[in-house]
Amino acid sequence: MSLFISKIHHLFDKIRIFATIYKIKPERSGEHINNQKPKEENNMQIIRRSNGILVEKDEGTKVVYHIFPEFEIHYNEVSPGTTQSWHHHDVIEEVLYILSGELEAHWREGGKDHKQIVRVGDVVRVKNVPHTFINSSPKPVTFVVFRFVPDGTDKHYIIKNDKHLE
């Protein structure tokens, strides 16, 4: 069996485990049964890193994916000398929070190429521009990616005020 096929089988095994842990069931034709959405549980969840889906990309990035119905969280480790492929997103937004190291953020906007070094504690709001990240340092870089689909609604008031003391 080729290495590629082996990696695909490993990925599908992780996805099956993830679906079992989070009680994800396939739906028919993308519709909910009886047109009802599944009940949301209001219980706190502690999700271990080991329960994520680990993907080691050929370019030198390791990603642990935590996938939820309305957002995703990814933990990324980028090896020294790694250049990620240029890409963009039509709908989703990515927000990076740098945990360790220094990373070059490259993006194309307004017909020009831009570059900036991001460091620990920096937040990168990618939006929909073509972009790539390069680790030209001698040390690994780690960051968390939050992925979601914004709907244009200002939710700041809700986010700021939705806290009730017990």
Image: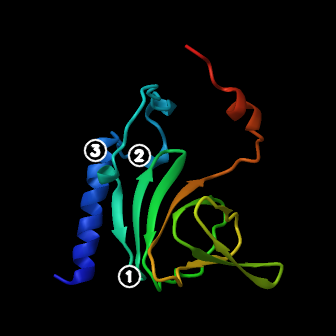
At 52% from the left edge and 83% from the top edge, which residue is drawn? 83
Q: Position of residue 29 (x, y in %)?
A: 46, 48
Q: Quadrant of the C terminus?
A: top right
Instruction: Identify residue for label 3.
Output: 20
Question: Looking at the rendered structure, which numbered label has been put on residue 43?
Answer: none
Position of residue 136 in the picture relative to residue 75 (left or right): right
Residue 59, located in which quarter of the rendered image? bottom left
Please, is residue 67 above or below residue 75 in the view? above
Q: Separation of disc 3 and disc 1 at Cα?
A: 28 Å
Tell me which label, 3 or 1, sits earlier in the chain: 3
Q: Which residue is mark 1?
A: 58
Q: Secondary structure at mark 1?
A: loop
Distance Cα–Cα, label 3 vs label 2:
18 Å
Is the Cβ of the residue at disc 3 closer than 8 Å to that at disc 1?
no
Q: Residue at x 48, y 47 (%)?
A: 30
The amino acid marked with disc number 2 is: Arg
Residue 78, quarter of the rendered image = bottom left
Q: Amino acid at mark 3?
A: Thr
* N-term mark: 3 or 2: 3
Circle 2 sits on which residue? 28
Question: Mark 3: which secondary structure?
Answer: helix
* Marks 2 and 1, the one that precedes in the sequence: 2
Q: Which amino acid type is shown beneath numbered disc 1?
A: Asp
In contact (CB < 8 Å): disc 2 and disc 1? no
Characterize the local packing of mark 3: few (<14), some (14-19) or many (20 or more) Cα atoms within 10 angstroms: few
The reply, left or right, for residue 41 in relation to residue 70 is: left
Residue lying furthest left: 1
Residue 57 is situated, as x and y percent measured from the top left of the image, at 39, 76
Measured as percent of width and height from the top left, residue 87 is found at: 60, 77
Mark 2 or 1, which is nearer the eye?
A: 1
Number of numbered markers? 3
